[in-house]
Image: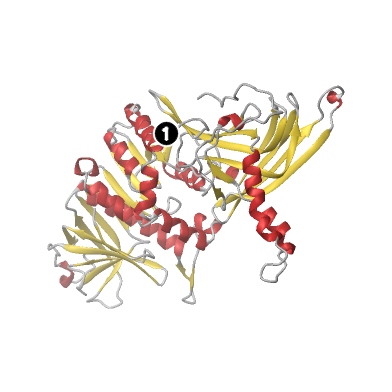
Amino acid sequence: MEIQKQSKQQQQEEFALASVTELASSSTSSSRSDSQSAPVIARFSAGNGVAVLRFNRDSESTDSISVDVKTAQLSKLGPLQSVCIAEASGADTGKEKYSTGVTVQFRNEEESRAFHCAFEQWKKKDIVQGTLLPNGAVTSFKSKFEDKIEPSSAKMYFHYYGQLLHQQNMMQDYVRTGTYYAAVMENRVDFIDRVVVDVGAGSGILSLFAAQAGAKHVYAVEASEMAEYARKLIAGNPSLGERITVIKGKVEEVELPEKADILISEPMGTLLVNERMLESYVIARDRFLVPNGKMFPAVGRIHMAPFSDEYLFVEIANKALFWQQHKYFGVDLTPLYGSAFGGYFSQPVVDAFDPRLLVAPTISHDLDFTEIKEEDLYEIEIPLKFVASVGTRVHGLACWFDVLFNGSTVQRWLTTAPGAPTTHWYQLRCVLSQPLYVMAGQEITGQLRMVAHNAQSYTIYLTLSAKMWGPGAEQGGILQTSSCKLDLKEPYYRMSQPQAYAMAQDQQPHQPIHTQMI
C-alpha cells in the first residue's frame, strides 16, 4: 500500500482508496445518504490528543466524514472490503454527533492490509501519545523505548540507519548476509505459508529472503527513514513484494493485524549487545510471536579469553604522551596526563586480531532470545575463570560472539570469531592499564559486568585477578588484580587486519589456542 504523505513526527498519514460509501442510518438525515463512490483519500491525523480518521473525495476537499479512531471499529467484509463503524461528526452537521458506518473499498489486498495496520497503530497512538484531560490539557505518555533511551541518542541512531551507505556497509558483509540467506533458504519448511515479522527491517533484504522462502506474508517493521527505501526496493521486486507490508514505526509501538509464526531480525551490535536492539527483539517476541514460534536467530553466545598484545598496549599508552609536554606553547600539559591516560584505556578496541594472541582456552555465555526477559538485558554479569596456557603478560580480555539460527532442517551459526572470515562486527578487546603477569597453569579469575545506559549502549566493568601459583596455591590467595571501566558506546575502531606477531625471545613456543568450534 502506497502511503501518500507522512510527516516526520507521524502526525498525519494518507491512503488512497478505491471508494468509500456511507451506510444508511435511521438517525441521520436524508442528506447523509449520499455515497462517495469516487476515489477518496483516507487521512489519519492527531489533534488535541485525539487520533481522527477523515475520508475526503480528494486531499483538498472539505466535504468529509470524520471518525474518532479511539471509539471506531474496523472489520473486514472481504479481501478488498471493510466496514468502519463509530461515533462521528460531519462538515454539514456542525458539532452534532451521531453513529455512522462506512464501507471502504480497496484496490488490492496489500492496500487493505496496510490500511488495517495503520488503523491499529493510530488507535494505539491515541492511547499512548495523548489523552484529553477535563481541563483541556493533553497529557503525554512515553513508549517503553522513549522511557529508557535519551532522545538525542535515538535521533542519531535512526538517522544513521536511515542512510543507504550504512545499509550497504552491512549488506556487503557477505559473511553476515550470506549466512542469513543460507539459514532462511535451508529452512524453507519454517517459512512456507507462515506469517513473518522482520524486526528492524532496514533495507528490507531479510523480508525479501523470507518471501523467497515461501512466506505467506511478511511485515517489515522499520522505525527510521529507511522504511521508504525498503518500500521502493520491495516494490521493485513485485513477485515478492506482493507478500510484504512495510510498517514505519518502533516495534514497541506498532500494531499488527495478526500474530507471527516466525521473527527474523539482525539485532546484533558490537559485543552482541551494543545499541540495545536485543531488547526490541525480545519485546517483538512478547508482542507478536505465537507460542512456540521460531526466532531467527534464536541464541546469542559471547566468547571470552584473556590475551597478550604488547604492541596494542604500547600503542594505546603512547596516545597520552601528548599530555606529557611541559612547554606546549608555554603551557604545561602534564596535569591532564593521568586523565588522558585513563581515558584512552576506557575505550574498548574494535579490530580483527590474530587468535594466537589468546593465552587461555575460551569460555562462553549464552543468551537465549526465546526465553530471556527484556529486564535480564539491563545488566549482564559473567564470572570469569581461565587457566593460562603460557607464561606471559595478560593485557586484557578479548570478546566476540556467535548467533544460532535454530532451523527445523539445518542449524546454522554466524560467527565473528578471530581467525574466521572477518565481519563488520570484527572482535572487541578490553585493555587493562595495568597488565597481569601469569605463569603457565596459573588460574585467572574475575568478572565481566555490563550495565545498560540510556545512550543505547553499555558500561563495561572488567576485573581480572591472577591467583597464587605453585606449591601452596591450593590454600588460595590473590597475587595481583587489575580492573577497568569502559564505555561500549565509544570504542577505538582500530580495525586492522590480523598481523603475524613476532614471538618474544623469552617466550616458549606453544600451540595456538583454538576458539570453540561451531
Q: Is residue 441 left or right of residue 105?
A: right
Q: Quick one: which residue is furthest to the left in this view? A: 38
In the rendered view, tell whether residue 240 sits above or below residue 419.
Answer: below
Percent position (x, y) of residue 308? 65, 35
Q: Is residue 71 left or right of residue 366?
A: left
Percent position (x, y) of residue 84? 27, 57
Colour logic: secondary structure
Q: Is residue 316 left or right of residue 128?
A: right
Q: Amino acid at mark 1?
A: Gly
Please give the name of the residue rendered at 64% of the width and 37% of the height, measured from the top-left corner. Answer: 309
Percent position (x, y) of residue 421? 45, 32
Percent position (x, y) of residue 154? 48, 58
Assign a secondary structure to mark 1: strand
- Between 241 and 413, the one lying in front of the other is 413
Q: How many marks?
A: 1
- Between 241 and 355, the one lying in front of the other is 355
Can residue 34 be seen by looking at this rendering? yes
In the rendered view, tell whether residue 55 sits above or below residue 246.
Answer: below
The answer to which quarter of the image holds residue 103 is: bottom left
Please give the name of the residue rendered at 51% of the width and 63% of the height, measured from the top-left corner. Answer: 152
- Between 469 and 288, the one lying in front of the other is 469
- Between 234 and 131, the one lying in front of the other is 234
Q: Residues within 10 Å of mark 1 (few under 14, many from 20)?
A: some
Can residue 75 be seen by looking at this rendering? no
Residue on which the image places disc 1 = 293
Q: Is residue 395 left or right of residue 104?
A: right
In the rendered view, tell whether residue 360 sits above or below residue 152.
Answer: above
